[in-house]
Image (cartoon, helix red, strand yellow):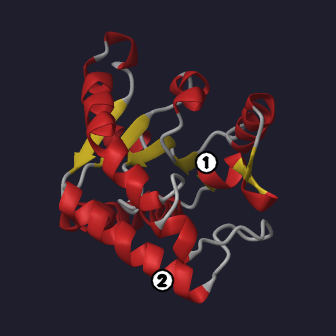
Amino acid sequence: MTNLPPRLERLQRINVVGTSSSGKSTFARRLANVLACPHVELDRLFWKPGWQQATPDEFKVRLEQAIGGKRWVIDGNYNTTQPIQHDRLTMVVWLDYSLVKTFSRAFHRAIRRSWTGQEVWPDTGNRESFRRNFASRDSVLLWALTSFRRNRKKYLAMMKKPELSSIEFIRLRHPRQAETFLQTLEDTTRTA
């Protein structure tokens, strides 16, 4: 990939971020497919069977193994992983959709997962229920609401940090922008 234009050269080690239910995993999976590189879902590294959380040491080891290669796309907002990621990242893609859009997605996803009982991450047995989603402090709906402003403030501040100036930040404000970004990249990589 050394003969690609500079912008494409930045597409080596990417973190897709955004509020819960913004579509990070779906976008990151598609981006990794376009770039023909591994996709790493931080939630999958963090959550063990029975909704048990990985210890900080376990999580760190799993992350370091997952991003040991030269190219990858990860998705997730874990503050504890930032020091490990920021040393290697070339780009952050921020899905900064409106609270209405994000919460609507969270609501529909919560209903779908509660109704179907689908496993959230393969081989974990972790499933979301109506109780977990609608009557629990662990509710993804509550998390989407309470983390929205905090995430926006955090990523706006990150974009201005001098020590992160080597990382290219892409802020996508609407799903149409995300789709255009992926389509343009797909067209560009096809002709590169």
Mark 2 surroundings: few (<14), some (14-19) or many (≥20) residues within 10 A: some
Figure quadrant of residue 191:
bottom left
Q: In the rendered image of this protein, does residue 80 appear above or below residue 91?
A: above
Q: Is residue 5 visible?
A: no
Q: Residue 72's x, y, as percent? A: 58, 47
Q: Amino acid at mark 2?
A: Arg
**Residue furthest top in the image:** 162
Q: Residue 133's x, y, as percent? A: 50, 67
Figure quadrant of residue 116:
bottom right
Point 56% across, 21% down: residue: 83
Q: Which mark is residue 42?
A: 1
Kindly report which numbered mark, 2 or 1, lies closer to the viewer in this rendering. Answer: 2
Q: In the rendered image of this protein, does residue 51 appear above or below residue 168?
A: below
Q: Secondary structure at mark 2?
A: helix
Q: Marks 2 and 1, how far apart in space?
A: 22 Å
Q: Is residue 87 visible?
A: yes
Q: Which residue is mark 2?
A: 112
Q: In the rendered image of this protein, does residue 115 appear above or below residue 159?
A: below
Query: Does the CB distance between marks 2 and 1 fall below 8 Å?
Result: no
